[in-house]
Each structure stands twice: as structure tokens, then as C-alpha cells.
Image (cartoon, rainbow, N blue to C red):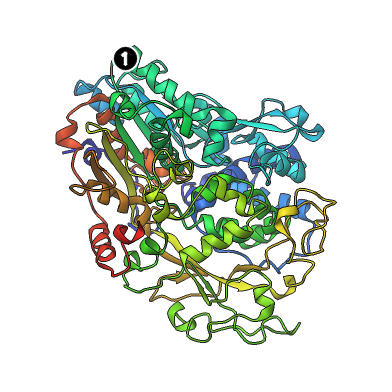
């Protein structure tokens, strides 16, 4: 049996939907601890900001986990900072103070050495073989300040993302913090006089903050069998940037290529590339870049570079076909965790870090555009992963009625939100002239293509400029020759760009399943936001505060206006798995199963056009099985399939250590483990008259 089946679990709980990190942390604290905590005096403002750093950082790393939003028109009548301190004092003392104490008192709560997968494999003679190169995912790498404006100069070379000081800086001067985290919306690069760069080394993403581990467990298990800084590297990057700019600004792909070549030269062995989340898309982009001639914008490694240098591509929880979560982030700045965590906190943070602020920040991050779903309606429009077969499964459904929308200050015509999406769509198929002025397509339902077209056309200052580095037309991308100047815009898309020529390469898709994961959204117009002043601002002039836009309005504060629409949290349907305005499918809580597994299955098919050299591809799923552990509070336990927790899943860690060391790989790892409905999803999708990969290209 595999070691992951032998590990003794701590306190178990019933399988099912994982609670939020904060709820799990609360359940891990015993009554005596709570009593002792509440007997303490109220912390000072400085201590409050320190506690708040832990909370905000954990919230940030979890922001991709689903959106149930507060109503943006609801504003609490409170003093923001004062109320925030009072609310968070109680919340942090009850939920996160123990985590902080453990981190700064030096108490270790890792599993005993004897029970770690790496230690057990060492007893079976596992030892260093292939060098390991790690490519982290979205938001989990720390960012440091190298140049800033006067409000931030005291933080030179300090972390403005991924540390306790991050939240203190945020609440001390939110506008200053935001200005240094956002990119220039016109260029996608650094704003004037500001340079924020990724931290380097294992410390960049081993732990996000305090005890919130990301890569540290896997690194420790690799260290158990002999790996260290000479045989393993982490290549972190600025996860805000569009992928092309990672190279043009930071030379990231050149550095990744050099690191792999150096490991290969010094060890005599091919490297194992291990990625997580968006890191899988970044790695896929790299594999296209490195074999393309330099004169066509590539790395000039030659057609056989991957074959000569890379042994395996281990894609953990990879976003190969993108994530629907990027849609509400870009469309309206929606964030679920604020509302779910605690209603009063949600309202207060909504006031202090509202949708407009979030949307304006996130829309400057080119990486979010790179995570938009890929493959178009042929893959996302049939409903095959939702247990239904249709011709038009929408990405966004508009719940406003089509008559009299926003014509009265007292009421708005709203469709019955409990009605399933396909029935609501029959009410009417046209929007009013007023709605068309908001750049909303004249349809009750947006397909995935319509949704992405809208975001590319109107989003955050980029507008059509984002098309200079990304294309979402998979059919056109498939037709482009590698020598074409436009091909690089499709390197992020595995539907448009096949795997490289590397017959001996192995690819492993390792991920969790069994968690409800966002798939589509229900929106409403906010009538009090509908006016020429608030809405109809030309997005292309936001970077010039004195500019007169093409429609005659002025971008008075240098930012786009607040979105006049928001997710309709009243929309629900048990039959269609719709909760709080979000329709869910299977996945790992962040990435849908369709994105996690579909391309891996298609790559593995005999004579696949997307895998012309016959690379061996294995899909290994882990069903989510949450556990409460006093030694690792706030996390899902050693068998969690959740998007970040999967990096500490004992089965996944065993697979990675075996692949790196070459220990019984063919017997233990080189086989599929399918525990979801993936096989049937692939079959339904491919049999759809207008669906599947054959119609996507």
C-alpha cells in the first residue's frame, strides 16, 4: 500500500465541504484556551495591527475561494477604523491569536519526523536523483518594495505582500498601499517611481505568513531524502504581471531556463518541474517559449530543449483551462470571503476596501486576464461538467427584468431569483437602451465568449491593450504557426498550443476534487450607480486625471468608476446547485474539475494532436477528506483536496518525492487515479454536437 494510506490521521470529521480557514481555526481551539484569551486586556493598537496582519494575509491567500458578496449599496453607519478594531479584537483573539502565539513563541506543530512521508521513503532508500525546480502560484509569493513614493519609503526592501507588515501598512495608509501594489493600467508594468519585486529563494513562498504554510511541508519532505539548495530551487515571480511581461521586465523565463540548465549540468540528471495553481499555466507558457526561436520572441532553446533538460512536469492543482473566479474579480471586484467570514466584518471591510478599490487594483494585474477560462464555448458552454447537456450554459446570467430597469428611484423590476437560469432567460432577450449604455451585450445570458470579450473591451484601463499579450481565440491560435508573431499570445492556452516535442517527458496532473467550486454567476444592475457620471467613463483615459475622455466626461480621480452591477446573492436553486448568486461545479474549491483534468485526459489519448510526440500523461486525483488537527489549526488535514492544502496532502507529497527520487515510480505513480466523474464529463463533452476539443480548435 502507499504510505499515504498508512499515515495515522488526527481527529477526523465527516467528509464533505470544507469550512473556511477561520472557521476551522476556531474549531481547533479548546474552551480553556478561549477562556484564557478573553481574560486578557484589550490589545494596544500596535498589537491589533499585528493580529490583523495574520487575518488579512490569510484572507488574501484565500480570496480565490468563492464569492458570496454583500450588497454594495449597504453602507454601515460607523467609524471604520474604530469599529474595525473593536470587531477584530474579538475575532482575532478567538480565532487567530493561538496561531500567532505558536509562530512567535517558536512552538513547532509539524508532524513528528517518523510519520512524514519523506522520512518513511528514506527508509526505503529514496535519495536525491532529479533536481527539483519549483514554480509557485498566484498570490502566494511575497512581494518586496525596491522603490516607492514618500509614503512608503520607510519600507524599502520590506514585504508589502506576504508578511505581518502588509496589513499594518494597508490600514495605516490604504491608498498608498494600493498605489504600490497596482500596476500601470496603460502598460501593465511599473507605475512611475515605484518598483515592487518578488522575494527570492525558498522563503518567498514556503510560508505565506506565520504558520500559514504553502510549500514548506513539501520542501521538508524532500529535505528528508536529501534535497537542499544545491539540488532544489524555487523560482518565484511577480504574480501580478502578464506572462509576456515576466520576461520583458524581469527576465523570468531566461532565469528559469538557466536554473534548469545549471541543475542539469551539475547533477547530470534532467530536472523535475513542480508547479502549483497559476504556476502550471506559467510553466506551460515557459515550455512554449523555450523551444521557440529568439527571433520570434522565444527562448531559442531549440525544438529538443525540453527533451534534453526536463524529466517531468508535475502540475499540482493547475489552472490549465483557467478559472471562472477571475471573472467577478475583473468584472466587479467581488470577493466572497468578506461576506462569508462574518457579516459585520464584511460590511466594515466593504466600506474600507470596497468593490471599487478592489476592482481598480485587480484590473491592473495582467495575470488575472491570463487566468480567464480557455477554450471558449466549445468547452465551457455545453454544461457537461454540470451534469446537463445544453447548447448555451452561460458564464453570467443577468437577473434584472428587461422592462423599466432603473427608470424609477423607488423600485427595480427584478426577475424571481429562485427561478433556474434557463427559465429566467425566456422572459425577454433584449436590454433597454439605458442598459446598452453600460456596455452590456443585449442578452439575458452571457456565454463564456461574450463574457471574456466584454472584459477585454472594457476592463480596468487595459481595454483592448490586453489583446497585445493574450488572445482567447483558441481556434485562431491553433492555426498560427510557431514562427508567427501572434503565436506568443496563445502560449498560455493549451487548447491553442500543443505540448512540446519531448517523447521521454512525463506529465503528472495532481489535484483535489470533491469541493464545490465556482462555475458561473448571477448579476444585477445597481440602479443608484447608473448615471453618466458614474458609469459612462471612457476606460482608456483613466491614467490621465486631467484628460477629457472621448465621451466628454473627465476621469476626475484617475480611476475607473465603481461597477454599476454586482452579484445577486439572492439567486439560488438547489436543483442547479446555485447558492448566493454563484453556480457551483466539482473542483478543488478554486479551480473547476473541467480546468483541472480535461486537458490532461485529452493529452493522454493515443495520437492526440495536442501531444504529438506521445508524452506520457497521468491524472491522479485526491478526493477531499477534511480533518481537524490541533497540530495544524486552520487547515484541512493531511488528506485535504483543497486548492492550497493539496500541497500538504500526503498522497501528493508521496508522489512528488517518488518522482524526484525515482523510487518505484512506474509501480506506484505511473497510473491514473480517477475518483471524480471526470471520465463521464470528458465523454459527454466530446459527444456534444458543438462541444469538445475538436470544436474548440
65 vs 408, left or right, is: left
- Above or below, 396 relative to 696: below
- Label 1: which secondary element: helix
Total labels: the figure holds 1
Examine the image and state in which quarter residue 221 appears. Answer: top left
- 322 or 30, nearer to the observer: 322
Residue wearing tag 1:
267
Examine the image and state in which quarter residue 49 appears. Answer: top right
- 220 or 187, nearer to the observer: 187
Place of residue 387 in the rendered image (x, y in percent of width and height, measured from the top left): 31, 69
Quarter of the C terminus within the rendering: bottom left
Q: Is residue 439 visible?
A: yes
Please tell me which residue is depicted at 46% across the width and 28% down the height of the picture.
Answer: 294
- Above or below, 235 relative to 537: above
Q: Is residue 624 visible?
A: no
Place of residue 152 in the rendered image (x, y in percent of width and height, measured from the top left): 76, 33
Examine the image and state in which quarter residue 8 appears. Answer: top left
- 447 or 202, nearer to the observer: 447
86 vs 283, left or right, is: right
How would you rate the neighbour count of disc 1 (Cα within 10 Å): few for under 14, some for 14-19, many for 20 or more?
Answer: some
Place of residue 257 in the rendered image (x, y in percent of width and height, measured from the top left): 42, 25
Quarter of the N terminus within the rendering: top left
Please tell me which residue is depicted at 52% across the width and 64% down the height of the picture.
Answer: 451
Place of residue 405 in the rendered image (x, y in percent of width and height, measured from the top left): 66, 82
The single residue placed furthest to the top in the displayed view is 266
- 632 or 327, nearer to the observer: 327
Amino acid at each position: 500500500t502507499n504510505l499515504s494510506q498508512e499515515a495515522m490521521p488526527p481527529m477526523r470529521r465527516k467528509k464533505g465541504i470544507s469550512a473556511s480557514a477561520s472557521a476551522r481555526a476556531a474549531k481547533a481551539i479548546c474552551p480553556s484556551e478561549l477562556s484564557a484569551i478573553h481574560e486578557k486586556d484589550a490589545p494596544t493598537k500596535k498589537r491589533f495591527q499585528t493580529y490583523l496582519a495574520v487575518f488579512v494575509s490569510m484572507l488574501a491567500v484565500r480570496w480565490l475561494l468563492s464569492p458570496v458578496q454583500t450588497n454594495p449599496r449597504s453602507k454601515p453607519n460607523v467609524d471604520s477604523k474604530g469599529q474595525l478594531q473593536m470587531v477584530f479584537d474579538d475575532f482575532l483573539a478567538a480565532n487567530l491569536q493561538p496561531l500567532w502565539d505558536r509562530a512567535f513563541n517558536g512552538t513547532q506543530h509539524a508532524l513528528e519526523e517518523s510519520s512524514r512521508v519523506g522520512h518513511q521513503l528514506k527508509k526505503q532508500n529514496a535519495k536525491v536523483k532529479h533536481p527539483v525546480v519549483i514554480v509557485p502560484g498566484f498570490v502566494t509569493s511575497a512581494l518586496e518594495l525596491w522603490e516607492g513614493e514618500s509614503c512608503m519609503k520607510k519600507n524599502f526592501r520590506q514585504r508589502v505582500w506576504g508578511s505581518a507588515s502588509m496589513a499594518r501598512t494597508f490600514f495605516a495608509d490604504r491608498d498608498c498601499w494600493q498605489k504600490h501594489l497596482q500596476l500601470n493600467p496603460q502598460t501593465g508594468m511599473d507605475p512611475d517611481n515605484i518598483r515592487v519585486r518578488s522575494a527570492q529563494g525558498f522563503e518567498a513562498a514556503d510560508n505565506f505568513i506565520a504558520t500559514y504554510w504553502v510549500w514548506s511541508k513539501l520542501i521538508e519532505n524532500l529535505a528528508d531524502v536529501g534535497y537542499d539548495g544545491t539540488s532544489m530551487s524555487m523560482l518565484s515571480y511577480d504574480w501580478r504581471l502578464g506572462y509576456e511581461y515576466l520576461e520583458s521586465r524581469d527576465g523570468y523565463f531566461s532565469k528559469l531556463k538557466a536554473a534548469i540548465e545549471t541543475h542539469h549540468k551539475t547533477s547530470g540528471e534532467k530536472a523535475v518541474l513542480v508547479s502549483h495553481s497559476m504556476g502550471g499555466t506559467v510553466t506551460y507558457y515557459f515550455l512554449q517559449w523555450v523551444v521557440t526561436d529568439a527571433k520570434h520572441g522565444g527562448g531559442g532553446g531549440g525544438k529538443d530543449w525540453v527533451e534534453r533538460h526536463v524529466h517531468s512536469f508535475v502540475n499540482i492543482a493547475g489552472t490549465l483551462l483557467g478559472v471562472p473566479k477571475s471573472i467577478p474579480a475583473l468584472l466587479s471586484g467581488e470577493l466572497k470571503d468578506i461576506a462569508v467570514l462574518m457579516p459585520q466584518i464584511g460590511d466594515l471591510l466593504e466600506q474600507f476596501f470596497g468593490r471599487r478599490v478592489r476592482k481598480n487594483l485587480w484590473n491592473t494585474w495582467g495575470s488575472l486576464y491570463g487566468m480567464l477560462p480557455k477554450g471558449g464555448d466549445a468547452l465551457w458552454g455545453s454544461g457537461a461538467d454540470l451534469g446537463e447537456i445544453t447548447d448555451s450554459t452561460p458564464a453570467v446570467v443577468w437577473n434584472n427584468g428587461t422592462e423599466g430597469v432603473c427608470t424609477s428611484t423607488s423600485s427595480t423590476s427584478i426577475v424571481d431569483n429562485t427561478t433556474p437560469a434557463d427559465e429566467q432567460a425566456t422572459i425577454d432577450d433584449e436590454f433597454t437602451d439605458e442598459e446598452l449604455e453600460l456596455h452590456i451585450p443585449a442578452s439575458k445570458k452571457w456565454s463564456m465568449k461574450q463574457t471574456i470579450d466584454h472584459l477585454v473591451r472594457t476592463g480596468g484601463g487595459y481595454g483592448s491593450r490586453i489583446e497585445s499579450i493574450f488572445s482567447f481565440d483558441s481556434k485562431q491560435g491553433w492555426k498560427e504557426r510557431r514562427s508567427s508573431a501572434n503565436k506568443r499570445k496563445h502560449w498560455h492556452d493549451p487548447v491553442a498550443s500543443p505540448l512540446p516535442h519531448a517523447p521521454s517527458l512525463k506529465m503528472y496532473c495532481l489535484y483535489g476534487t470533491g469541493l464545490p467550486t465556482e462555475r458561473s454567476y448571477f448579476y444585477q444592475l445597481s440602479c443608484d450607480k447608473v448615471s453618466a457620471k458614474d458609469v459612462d467613463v471612457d476606460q482608456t483615459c483613466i491614467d490621465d486625471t486631467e484628460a477629457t475622455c472621448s465621451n466628454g466626461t473627465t476621469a476626475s480621480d484617475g480611476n475607473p468608476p465603481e461597477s454599476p452591477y454586482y452579484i445577486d446573492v439572492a439567486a439560488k436553486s438547489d436543483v442547479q446547485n446555485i447558492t448566493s448568486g454563484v453556480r457551483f461545479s466539482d473542483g478543488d474549491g478554486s479551480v473547476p474539475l473541467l480546468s483541472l483534468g480535461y486537458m490532461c485526459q485529452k493529452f493522454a489519448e493515443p495520437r492526440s494532436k495536442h501531444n504529438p510526440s506521445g508524452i506520457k500523461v497521468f491524472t491522479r486525483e485526491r478526493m477531499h477528506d477534511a480533518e481537524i488537527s490541533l497540530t495544524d489549526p486552520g487547515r484541512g488535514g493531511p488528506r485535504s483536496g483543497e486548492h492550497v492544502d493539496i500541497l500538504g496532502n500526503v498522497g501528493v507529497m508521496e508522489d512528488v518525492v517518488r518522482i524526484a527520487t525515482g523510487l518505484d515510480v512506474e509501480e506506484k505513480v505511473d497510473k491514473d487515479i480517477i475518483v471524480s466523474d471526470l471520465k463521464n464529463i470528458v465523454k459527454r463533452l466530446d459527444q456534444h454536437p458543438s462541444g469538445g476539443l475538436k470544436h474548440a480548435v
